[in-house]
Image: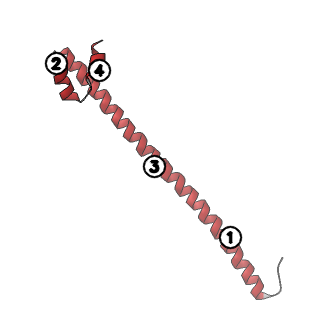
């Protein structure tokens, strides 16, 4: 309710502006938080994707090296795979 007292009206308007600024700040923080979360999620997914791609490449290389007749120890050294991973490829 509006008052005829000018000072009271100014206080009321200042309180209204402060409340709107607070709501706006919270909303902006939520939006920024969502954007940061999405970016982190993409970065994490990208990192996992790169690691998976490297693993697939190492397995393909190991398979080729097995076909070429290299020893398990040589393939381990060349690819970084474990002996059990290489032995699974032989099956």
The residue tagged with tag 3: helix, strand or loop?
helix
- Which sits earlier in the primary sequence, circle 1 or circle 4? 1
Circle 1/circle 4 CB separation < 8 Å? no
Please name the residue that numbered disc 1 is placed on: 19
Disc number for residue 84: 4
Disc number for residue 71: 2
Disc number for residue 39: 3
The residue at the point 25 percent across, 22 percent down is 83
Q: Position of residue 46 (x, y in %)?
A: 39, 41
- Which sits earlier in the primary sequence, circle 1 or circle 2? 1
> Which one is closest to the eye, mark 2 or mark 3?
2
Q: Is residue 33 left or right of residue 85?
A: right
Mark 1 to mark 4 CA distance (whole Å): 64 Å
- Colour scheme of the picture: secondary structure
The residue at the point 80 percent across, 88 percent down is 5
- Which sits earlier in the primary sequence, circle 2 or circle 4? 2
Mark 1 to mark 3 CA distance (whole Å): 30 Å
Q: Residues within 10 Å of mark 1 (few under 14, many from 20)?
A: few
Q: Is residue 87 left or right of residue 68?
A: right
């Amino acid at each position: 309710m509006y008052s005829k007292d000018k000072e009271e009206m100014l206080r009321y308007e200042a309180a209204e502006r402060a409340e709107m600024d607070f709501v706006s700040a919270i909303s902006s923080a939520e939006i920024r938080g969502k954007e940061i979360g999405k970016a982190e999620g993409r970065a994490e997914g990208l990192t996992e994707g790169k690691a998976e791609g490297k693993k697939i490449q190492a397995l393909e290389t190991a398979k080729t090296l097995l076909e070429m007749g290299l020893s398990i120890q040589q393939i381990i050294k060349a690819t970084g795979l474990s002996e059990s991973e290489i032995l699974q490829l032989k099956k």
